[in-house]
Image (tube, grey):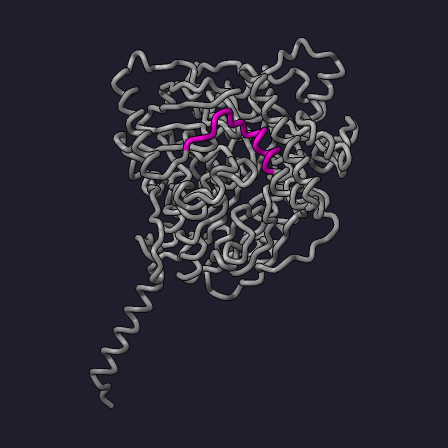
Amino acid sequence: MAVPLRHIAMALVGWGLCAAAWAAPARPNIVLLLADDWGFSDVGAYGSEIETPNLDELARRGMRFSNFHVTASCSPTRAMLLTGVDNHRNGVGNMRETIPQSHVGRPGYLSVLDTNVVTVATLLRDSGYRTYAAGKWHVGKAPHNLPPARGFDRSLVQGDSGSDNWETAKRYLDLTEQVDWFEDGQRAVMPDEYYSSQFFVDKAIDYIRSGQGSGKPFFAYVAFQANHIPVQAPQAFIDKYKGRYQAGWTALRQTRRDRAIALGLIPKDTPMVTMSTTTDWDRLSDADKAYQARRMEVYAAMADAMDHHVGRLIAHLKASGEYDNTVFVFLSDNGAEASDPYAVTLGRWWLDRHYHRDLERLGGKGSYTIIGPSWASAAASPLSTYKFYSGEGGIRVPLIVSGVAGMPRNQIHHSLSHINDIAPTLLDLAQVPRPGRSHQGQAIEPMTGTSLLPVLMGQARRVHPDAEAIGYELSGNQALFKGDLKLIRNIPPVGDGQWHLYDILLDPGETNDLQSRLPEAFRAMQADYASWAKANGVLPMPEGYDPIQQVLINSLVNVYVPRYRNAAAGLLLAAIALGWVVVRRRRSR
């Protein structure tokens, strides 16, 4: 019996569609791993002595970026990572913890995500991805800013700037009334005790496993608390580093610089300076050296433990057959943390009531430790400054991209790249168009970054053209990037409040000021910065602003005054805070 032509045609069309579907590459799973407060050279693949074998293996399978920039503190980076929009336009012009009271609520300074941006998770979910989040959130705790409203199918997040890593209800400073945990947008029921890195990976694995068999790729955002203060780690990991840091921070800074050179991450003979905030190790007593060395042992252990749990996630994906179709993106939200809450009277008073500092128990439950500015400088080696400041040590961090189909392996990319480049890269990997100025009928801020995919595939030599000016400001510290040049101004006490010009490709440690050699570029880039700041609504900082002082003021305003609603108590606390600030400013002058 003859087959009708229309049946033959339909069969051919069906066969063609099947063949096309068979030939089309499957959209990859995407795992976005965000470390907290890791310095540029804290990963083994970037020159560290810390054991990070799982991250190092991702680096060998992919590309390391040696010139990648974020913001100098937590929530502005996270907001840009999720949206691809400058933090002054996405609502997080400053952190809730460090924002001057005169800026609060001003356009661009909500300190949480604004409603005028759409997240990459929303766009991926709309295109058929399963979307999951586990870890530190820190971009808003109102219902419209929790993960379900921002594109995540499943989520378990800590909504604040940080918390204890052993006890789920324990705050790390008196900055909020409680630790705010949310699962799928509702108050979470948490275990009393846990270890944060392990718990977040457990949740990510549970969520990924729950969607197996759906036929949909997944996007998993795992945002660790490691190595945010308090620096804490399991004892078995701490024991691995016993005696490793007896030579001190200056020796470590030099060793890491040399390893980064040998790895090809920075130029040969890269110079670096010793920061004014670095103490002379040789002048410490033996007891002080032992205590400081233990601090760094715990810090290394915390990073090592995080890498271990990343390895558990990788092992799960291998066992489930998902690994070979998974892209991994790893980065830190800013440089290493140098602050010491014990240096502030109110901070020390609160901490001594809730934590101990015993040498033999550092890192364990109930302990509180930091690394301070000297070790933070080593963690950023060979760069200058650290968290909160716009020197390279504050905003240049490791970025590893691994698992992209067809990309060359074990590559290093040296041209300037930026946190706003991540969102468009993820969309390109998922074959999802970038939104314009509207999404589902709502006006939104457009993404401003550039996809890294051409660089990853070896099709481009630079991410951004030399003529493109990329501005930066956070808490009064400013920068502008153009090609390999960087214009920078940092406020006191770490900076001098003056503009400087560096070639950060050849001089990543920012040691050779080029303003007198390149006067035209110096003036032009200042004009570029002024134009960028005006276009993005950057507000000038109040005179005498200091981020550490501001944390205290905001703690008093946001926590203590509401807690003690009695008017007299509130006025007394406000007067104490004002007097303290006045005294500090007079001393600084």
Q: Visible in this render: residue 402?
A: no
| Residue at x 62%, y 38% (from the top left corner) | 555
Task: Check the image and report above or below for 281 versus 535.
Answer: above
Residue 36 appears in which quarter of the rendering? top right
Is residue 550 highlighted in magenta? yes
| Residue at x 41%, y 35% (from the top left corner) | 539
| Residue at x 47%, y 45% (from the top left corner) | 105
Task: Check the image and report above or below for 491 versus 537.
Answer: above
Outermost residue toward the top in this view: 283
- Decide if residue 206 is on the left or right side of residue 544: right
Give the camera-side residue of 39 and 391.
391
Outermost residue toward the left in this view: 5
| Residue at x 50%, y 66% (from the top left corner) | 214
Quadrant of the frame with the N terminus: bottom left
Is residue 96 highlighted in magenta? no
Residue 511 image point, x, y percent = 43, 15
Give the camera-side residue of 516 and 55.
516
Residue 573 image point, x, y percent = 67, 35
Q: Visible in this render: residue 117?
A: yes
Give the camera-side residue of 324 and 278.
278
Residue 409 image point, x, y percent = 42, 38
Magenta span of residues: 540-554
